[in-house]
Structure formats: C-alpha cells, structure tokens
Image: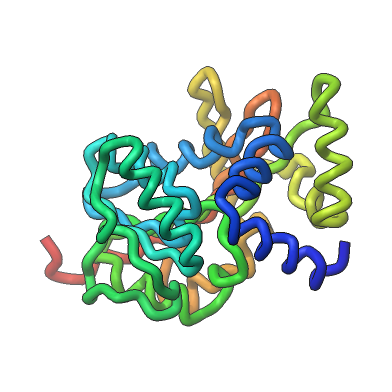
Amino acid sequence: MTPHLRKWLFETLYKNRYLYRFASTVPFAGQWRVWQGLVLPRIHGQDILELGCGLGDLLADMLEAGYMCRAVEHSPQMVEAARATLRRRHVGIDAWIIQGSAQHLPFSDHSFDTVVSTFPSEYIYDPDTISEIERVLRPGGRLVVIEGAHLEQVGYFQPVLLLFHLLVYGSRAFSATKRQPIDGDEHDDGAFTTEELPGIPFGALIPLEQSGLQRRSQRVRSRRWQVFITMGEKAVTKGTP
C-alpha cells in the first residue's frame, strides 16, 4: 500500500468511531486495549495529559484509576466519541477533552507529570510537538509513547492478520521484531517480559534529545505479541524539591 493510500485509509477510519473501533480490534486480535494498558504502570505523578485520545478508552481507564487527566484530540469526530465514552463509563466531564493540536498545547508551563500517546500519527515526530510536551511537563516528568506493536506468528488466526499488516504497513511492519541483544535490565512479571533496550532504533524519529528529554526504550513481550515503548524523561532542575 502506498503512503498516500495508507494516509487516506487512516484518515477515513479516524472520522468514524465504528470503523475505528473495528480497525483497532479485529486486525490486532483484540490486543489493542491490552497494549494501551501498558501505559498505566509507567505513569509518573498524578496530573496526566493524553495526546490523541481517540475513542477515549485509555483516558477513561486513567480517570477510573484516580488520575487527574486532560486530553487533546485533533479530530472533532474522535472528540465527540471520547466524550461519549466518558459519559458511558461515568468518569470525567466533556470539557476535559479539548479539540486542538499537539504542536500548540493550550496549557501553561509545568502543568503535567506525565504525557502519554498511544499509537500516534506523524505529529509525534514533529519537533514542535516534543517542544510543547517538554514545556508542559514538570521537572522530573515523563513522556510515554507506545509507538508500535507486532503480533507473533502463533496459532491459526494471527499469521493471517500478519499478512494484512504486511499489506497495509509494508516490510517496516516487521523491521523492529528481530530479537536484539540486551544491554540492560529484563523484568518478567509472569504475563509480560519487559526489556530495557538502550540504543535500539525504534523511536529514533521522535526528537526527544532536541528538547532536552532523556530517552528510554523498552520492549514488552508476551507469547502473542511485542510492543515498543519510547519514553522521554525531563530532568529535575536544580533547586526543585
């Protein structure tokens, strides 16, 4: 699939909550929500901003967990869908989801402890986006980006889905799945294995260092999938308590 056609497809899906729900569920063997949930143990602090909240599922999860959350979403269709999710799950209020741009965040400096973005589009590679994230993060704050995920070739259904991913994303869909030498920590919690992978190429296009954020790269694996997480941590300034 050409980049132009792929962009048209994603933009079409993003304008219809029902197509978006289907596209984020069936092609990923129902694991999309599991992958989103990997954000929760990586949250730092209490005040959270989500960029590109989509249908609002993760936002509702974070609110139910007791975090103070705001969200910025570019698509008016997804803003309404996310607000409907909050109403259905009886958390938050409509005003906490703002239609806007990640490159021009409508918040004051040092407003949030963590900024999260799951499966973002090209905005996450824009230096203006990262500069804005750094601005609204408090010292010691953290950006958490779930940039991509891949199903493994297990069972009968997932190999078929992998062929679909190859059609849509091309060979880059599998470029990060090769097992890399580990130069860091590996943690197995029984369900998932988390690896710290310094120097790994995924996430390299997110210009964290340009805005002074320290990069961390993690891969989370289960028997069925791999997820790639990039974090940017803001330094604690001198004199900060």
Residue drawn 24% across the image and 51% down it? 93
Q: In the displayed structure, would residue 33 be above or below residue 82?
A: above
Of residue 180 and residue 2, the one placed in the foreground of this image is 2
Of residue 81 and residue 183, the one placed in the foreground of this image is 81
The quadrant where residue 67 appears: top left
- Of the 4 image quadrants, the one containing the N terminus is bottom right
Residue drawn 81% across the image and 46% down it? 165
Q: In the displayed structure, would residue 34 be above or below residue 52?
A: above
Residue drawn 54% across the image and 68% down it? 124
Residue 51 seen in the figure: yes
Of residue 187 and residue 5, the one placed in the foreground of this image is 5
Residue 183 seen in the figure: no
Judge left or right: residue 220 versus residue 209: right
Q: Please tell me how many numbered marks the rendered image carries.
A: 0
The quadrant where residue 170 appears: bottom right
Report x, y in % for residue 221.
63, 32
Q: In the displayed structure, would residue 100 be above or below residue 18?
A: below
Residue drawn 54% across the image and 50% down it? 146
- Of the 4 image quadrants, the one containing the C terminus is bottom left
Report x, y in % for residue 141.
30, 59
Report x, y in % for residue 151.
73, 35
Judge left or right: residue 95 versus residue 241: right
Report x, y in % for residue 40.
39, 39
> Which colour assignment does the render follow?
rainbow
